Image (spheres, grey):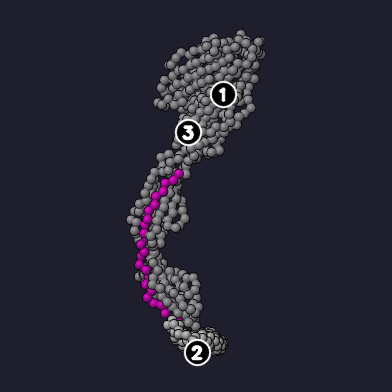
């Protein structure tokens, strides 16, 4: 009956709770039960590796030595055919150790027995079995550890024998998950998407701590199914790690409560801080070509995250994206380009946002410009404009018309197989002076430079032209007459002001002349008195030579001063006449 219960339990376990792909689990069977103190019961250790062959496993089992005692270990039914060491146990420390090998091709399945432990219940209470460590190695020639979960078991030991449950209740009893806690939910505020690549070397991870969790163990490495080994007690809920190297990393976390270690959670981290490989832009037709859509090659690689997309900028235009598949499968053809020199800038972005840049200059040579062979140099505004010319066969000709002071307007016509084209305006042109020229775009979308500019005069009918001429004449004559009158008034006004100034100046000169004569006469009189006094002294005594000399100098200087003043006054009078 006991065997039937075990078979039913195994069917429930493997049917209701399949294991994840490419991951192995070590677990106990049965995971729970009730036994009487003094009784003996068996617990087997199983391995599950449903999607990948394993060829070796090891484990260290811990049990409470005050509640349980190992009577014996059994290898019966084990998938191991070779033991690295014989299974061992220690009742004093409460430990069981095993390590064995399943020879090639190894074991693939969901219920491979490894070892059976026969226990004796020593005291009443709860007895918990845990794996303190474990490993399951893949049969891949590398010994990759593919262990993902370590189970646990809990048994209730009573002083009296428990009532045996019926077969129905045993078969329908709810299954208890081997792990006491489910795997924690890890998130990263710095690297929120596990499928994306990032150029950040510093990362932060967080996870919630459920009630009852007392410890957490962590591990960071490049093995996707590694078992955490660094224990934090009490349990922490976040961890920051700096300066990651480029590559794919896994952050592993596992929680523990009173029931044992729970499932292992893994968070994938993809870091790439290096730009794609350097590359150059090559023009298939050369950097000088008449081809308006030149073909270029600029493919590159990124060894880690891979090329995500390209961005291209031509001349002063905006950047536009290009998928890497387009560039890799075929040389890339640029959009149509107008004639002239310009540069092309290509940025290659990897999936982490790093980019490499290449720049090259190229020149699109123009095709020959159209020739306008027939057009009216002068026409009336009641006529329609007719233009004829020659250019490249089966090409698109653009006629440009620009009236003075206005923006140019364009009209498109098609040349025939001989290259001849003609343009007939749909609307009449307004009176004025026009500039006309033409450009051409051939079937390959190559463009020309503008042709020589022609001048067209559009005139109104004769009567209107006379009126316009008269109006134009009045527009010129009236302002001119007003200007002449203004100049005449300014000249008259200036002459009038000058005459008044001249009269005032003459008056001032006359008054100055009279004042000067008067002052000079007084000075002469005073000097003559001085001379007379000296001459009178001469009658009384003999004058010295110096005194005679002074008298002569006074007379001479007085005459010279009078002549000079009279001459200056006469010069002023001449200037103002």
Q: Which residue is mark 3?
A: 249
Q: Earlier in the sequence, mark 1 or mark 3?
A: 3
Q: Position of residue 497 (x, y in %)?
A: 56, 86
Q: Which residue is mark 2?
A: 573
Asked whether 406 or 184 is in front, the reply is: 406
Residue under the image location 52 percent in, 11 percent down:
90
Q: Indicate the secondary structure of the residue bearing disc 3.
A: strand
Residue under the image location 41 percent in, 60 percent down:
337
Disc 1 + disc 2, Cβ < 8 Å = no
Q: Which residue is mark 1?
A: 261
Farthest-out residue, left: 286
Q: Indicate the secondary structure of the residue bearing disc 1.
A: strand
CA separation in Å, label 1 and label 2: 131 Å
Mark toward the viewer: 1 or 2: 2
Q: Position of residue 148 (x, y in %)?
A: 51, 27
Q: Residues within 10 Å of mark 2 (few under 14, many from 20)?
A: some
| Region rendered in magenta | 354-379
Q: Position of residue 77 (x, y in %)?
A: 49, 16
Q: Earlier in the sequence, mark 1 or mark 2?
A: 1
């Amino acid at each position: 009956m006991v065997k039937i219960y075990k078979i039913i339990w195994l069917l429930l376990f493997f049917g209701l709770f399949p294991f994840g792909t490419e991951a192995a689990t070590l677990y106990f069977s049965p995971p729970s039960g009730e036994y009487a103190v003094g009784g003996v019961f068996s617990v087997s250790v199983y391995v599950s590796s449903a999607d990948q062959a394993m060829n070796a496993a090891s484990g260290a089992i811990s049990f409470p030595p005050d509640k349980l005692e190992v009577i014996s270990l059994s290898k019966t039914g084990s998938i191991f055919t070779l033991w690295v060491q014989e299974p061992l146990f220690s009742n004093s420390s409460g430990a069981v150790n095993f390590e064995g090998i399943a020879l090639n091709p190894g074991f693939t399945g969901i219920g491979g027995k490894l070892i059976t432990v026969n226990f004796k219940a020593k005291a009443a209470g709860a007895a918990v079995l845990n794996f303190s460590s474990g490993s399951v190695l893949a049969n891949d020639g590398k010994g990759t550890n593919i262990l993902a979960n370590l189970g646990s078991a809990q048994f209730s030991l009573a002083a009296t024998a428990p009532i045996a449950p019926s077969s129905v209740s045993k078969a329908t009893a709810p299954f208890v998950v081997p792990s006491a806690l489910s795997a924690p939910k890890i998130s990263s505020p710095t690297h929120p998407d596990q499928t994306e690549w990032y150029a950040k070397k510093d990362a932060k991870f967080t996870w919630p701590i459920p009630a009852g969790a007392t410890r957490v163990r962590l591990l960071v490495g490049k093995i996707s199914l590694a078992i955490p080994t660094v224990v934090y007690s009490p349990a922490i809920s976040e961890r920051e790690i700096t300066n990651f190297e480029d590559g794919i990393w896994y952050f592993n976390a596992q929680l523990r409560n009173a029931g044992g270690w729970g499932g292992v959670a893994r968070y994938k981290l993809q870091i790439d801080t290096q730009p794609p490989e350097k590359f150059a832009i090559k023009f298939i037709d050369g950097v000088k070509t008449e081809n308006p859509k030149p073909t270029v090659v600029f493919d590159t690689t990124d060894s880690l995250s891979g090329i995500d997309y390209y961005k291209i900028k031509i001349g002063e235009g905006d950047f536009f994206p290009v998928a890497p598949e387009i560039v890799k499968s075929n040389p890339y053809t640029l959009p149509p380009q107008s004639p002239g020199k310009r540069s092309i800038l290509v940025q290659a972005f990897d999936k982490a946002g790093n980019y490499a840049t290449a720049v090259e200059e190229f020149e699109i040579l123009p095709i020959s410009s159209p020739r306008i062979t027939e057009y009216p140099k002068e026409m009336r505004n009641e006529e329609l404009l007719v233009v004829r010319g020659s250019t490249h066969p089966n090409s698109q000709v653009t006629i440009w018309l620009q009236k003075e002071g206005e923006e140019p307007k364009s009209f498109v016509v098609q040349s025939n197989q001989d290259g001849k084209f003609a343009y007939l305006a749909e609307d009449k042109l307004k009176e004025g002076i026009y500039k006309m020229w033409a450009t051409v775009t051939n079937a390959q979308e190559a463009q020309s430079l503008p042709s020589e500019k022609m001048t067209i005069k559009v005139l109104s009918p004769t009567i209107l032209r006379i009126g316009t001429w008269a109006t134009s004449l009045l527009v010129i004559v009236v302002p001119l007459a007003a200007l002449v009158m203004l100049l005449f008034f300014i000249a008259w006004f200036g002459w009038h002001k000058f005459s008044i100034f001249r009269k005032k100046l003459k008056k001032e000169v006359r008054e100055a002349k009279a004042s000067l004569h008067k002052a000079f006469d007084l000075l002469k009189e005073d000097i003559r008195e001085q001379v007379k006094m000296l001459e009178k002294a001469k009658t009384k005594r003999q004058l010295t030579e110096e005194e005679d000399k002074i008298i002569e100098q006074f007379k001479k200087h007085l005459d010279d001063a009078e002549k000079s003043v009279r001459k200056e006054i006469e010069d002023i009078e001449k200037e103002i006449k």
